[in-house]
Image (cartoon, grey):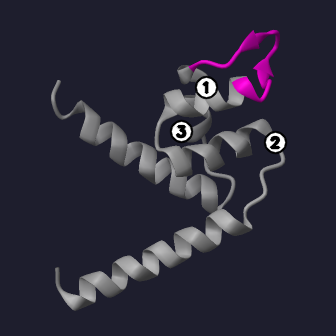
Amino acid sequence: MLVEEAKKRIEYLQEYIRMIESYTPTTMEEEAVYLYVQLESVTKVVQELNKKGYRIGNRKLTTVDVSNIIRAKPKDEMHELAKRMFTKNRKRGSRYW
């Protein structure tokens, strides 16, 4: 890795840490986005949100619900990051199909 690449990566990680530490989710959607940025797994986000008691109507959340939240038009910087990560992960995962 070149020094310039390492510097860019450090800057990215510092910005990531700043964003995570300063973000306070106030809605289920924000909580889903926040958790996705940290866990990078829709399934794990669904499990966490269901543990916390979040529901849509009277049913538990599904991976489709969380995927739709992430794919929606970004409402803030955290959501934009989650959407980029989601798109990147989808492309990487679908490579084998």
Element class at badge 2: loop
Which quadrant is home to the C terminus? top left
Along the polypeptide, which appears first: circle 2 or circle 1? Answer: 2
**Structural crowding at the residue carrying mark 1, measured as other residues with C-alpha within 10 Å and reported as few (<14), some (14–19) or many (≥20):** some
Circle 3: residue type: Arg
Q: In the image, what residue occupies the spot 57% across and 40% down?
A: 70
Element class at badge 3: helix
Side of 1 relative to 49 (left or right): left
Q: In the image, what residue occupies the spot 56% across and 56% down?
A: 80
Q: Which mark is residue 71?
A: 3
Question: Mark 2 near mark 1, Cβ–Cβ under 8 Å?
Answer: no
Q: CA distance from mark 3 to mark 1?
A: 19 Å
Q: Nearer the viewer, residue 29 or 23?
A: 23
Residue range in magenta is 51-62
Circle 1: residue type: Gln
Measuring from the top left, give residue 56's x and y in whole percent.
77, 18
Measuring from the top left, give residue 49's x and y in whole percent.
69, 30
Residue to which mark 1 is pinned? 47
**Structural crowding at the residue carrying mark 2, measured as other residues with C-alpha within 10 Å and reported as few (<14), some (14–19) or many (≥20):** few
Question: Mark 3 near mark 1, Cβ–Cβ under 8 Å?
Answer: no
Q: In the image, what residue occupies the spot 70% across and 23% down?
A: 50
Residue to which mark 2 is pinned? 27
Q: CA distance from mark 2 to mark 1?
A: 17 Å
Circle 2: residue type: Thr
Side of 62 relative to 27 (left or right): left
Q: Nearer the viewer, residue 33 or 14?
A: 14
